[in-house]
Each structure stands twice: as C-alpha cells, then as structure tokens.
Amino acid sequence: MMFSYQLYSSRNFPPLADTLAMLAAAGYEGVEGYGALYADDALVAQLVAHLGDSGLVMPTGHFGLAQLESDPAKVLAIARSLGISRIYCPYLMPDDRPRDAAGWHAFGTRLQKAGEPFREAGFGFGWHNHDFELVPLADGSIPQDLIFAGGPDLEWEIDVAWVIRGGADPLAWISKYGHRITAAHVKDIAPAGENTAEDGWADVGHGTVDWPGIMAALRATPCTNFIMEHDNPADHTRFATRSLAAAKEL
C-alpha cells in the first residue's frame, strides 16, 4: 500500500521541482501524473529528472481519452519512462457525455477497446470517476454501472468524494465493485457553506467524509495506491502535510 499525491492538486504552485521536494519531505512515497506534465518529450525528461532528484515514484498516471485512442504507443513510452504501471482515463467533457443508457454502455465498450494495448503490454487500465457517472439517468440506470457493464476488464480508480457529490454512497459502491478498485483518490468535503474559496473541498480528515470507515472498506479491495487530492487548495503544503498525517492514522 502506498500513500501518493495527485500533482494536479499543486498545478497552481510552481515550480514542480519544489513541489516534489515538499512532498518527499512531508513523507509521501509516490505521486500521480496528469496530462499537462507530459505533454511533450522535454516535459517528460524534466519530470523523470525531478522524480529522480526527489526520490519519489509515479506508479499511476492520468491520460486523456483522445491520446489513449490515437497514440497508444506514445502513452506506453511515456508510462515506461516515468515508471507508471497503471493508466487511468480521467474525464469526459460535458458535450461528449452520452445521454442514455445505451450510450453509456457503448462508452464502456469504447474504454474496454482503448485499454487493450495497455493490458496487452502488462499495464493496468481503468476509469477515474467524477460525480456525473453516479447521477441516475431518466430511466433510473446509473452511468457508472453501464460503463462497467460495457467494459468488463476495466479497473477503477474510485474518487470517493466525487461519488458522494454525485449523491451516492461510496461504501455501497465499494461493496459492489471492490474487485475492480486498484487505486483511490483520498479527498474530503468541507461542511456545507465552508471553504467556498477552495470549492468546498477540505484537507483529508478535516471534512465530512467518513474516512475511517471508507479506508477500512478500501483495504479489503485490490487497491494499492491511496492518492491525496484537493482540486483547489489555497495552500498546497498545508493540504499535503495535514492530509498525509490524517491518512496515516486511518
């Protein structure tokens, strides 16, 4: 089990080398990458160097669907350079989201196909949720169920706080699909009306999410990477240090 950190949380606090040094000093073992960090070969080389300097590893990474489908060879090259072993597709823009059950099932099938070259190369491949996948459709079906029905081999990087913001019970979803969960985003939600400048998110262990109960449930799954994330922290050092300290007590 590894406590990691989604570098998207620190996108507004450059330079990256200082962020990685801060995370290493705070006690993190790993980090999770996202597309902007490896948008070209020079950035990949820079990231490899910075990871080496900090002593951190990058076992997981987010890659956009367009690149996953159009240039899997490039994704594999980037992943191998950075030591990534699990690749997650992280998002679908609103205009691209299906509107009915058949569309979401087809999207799951699309992800299943997109993941083939990565699974064949020995990488884990899966989906990272937000809130929209948990909101029932007009017929009562739920997109996340349909995605998994269409993609039987998809792993799941569960974002627990987004599950809650989607109006769903994370413990029920962990119980239902725990066998697919190979990573988890560990983030917290502030009490209603609080932390509005930080989009209502909170440092892990300082919000409303039942992290003791959820962490116990996640430990019973194949999840190996527990990744701290905050979508808009005012102070990333505060978030990183307080969240890791709280997570280690869970």
Image (cartoon, grey):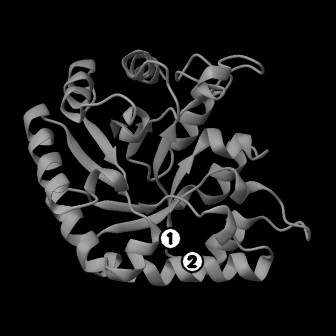
Residue 151, label in figure? 2
Q: For the point 70% across and 73% down, which residue is it?
A: 146
- Quick check: marks 2 and 1 in contact, CB under 8 Å? yes
Q: Residues within 10 Å of mark 1 (few under 14, many from 20)?
A: many
Q: Is residue 132 left or right of residue 128?
A: right
Name the residue that disc number 1 marks: 154
User: 192 or 169, which lies in front?
Assistant: 192
Q: Quadrant of residue 110?
A: bottom right
Q: Cα distance, mark 2 to mark 1? A: 5 Å
Q: For the point 44% across and 80% down, which residue is it?
A: 114
Query: x%, y% of residue 156?
Result: 52, 59
Please state the total of marks drawn on the protein image: 2
SS type, badge 2: loop
Identity, as a three-letter code, of the amino acid under mark 2: Gly
Q: Is residue 125 above or below residue 28?
A: below
Q: Is residue 81 left or right of residue 145?
A: left
User: 214 or 18, which lies in front?
Assistant: 18
Q: Residues within 10 Å of mark 2 (few under 14, many from 20)?
A: many
Q: Is residue 75 above or below residue 44?
A: below
Q: Is residue 68 above or below residue 31?
A: below
Query: x%, y% of residue 188?
Result: 59, 28
Q: Residue furthest right?
A: 139
Q: Is residue 162 left or right of residue 82?
A: right
Query: x%, y% of residue 106?
Result: 65, 83
Identity, as a three-letter code, of the amino acid under mark 1: Leu
Q: For the point 70% across and 75% down, which residue is it?
A: 104
Residue 22, label in figure? none
Q: For the point 27% across and 39% down, which residue is it?
A: 30
Q: Quadrant of residue 201?
A: top right
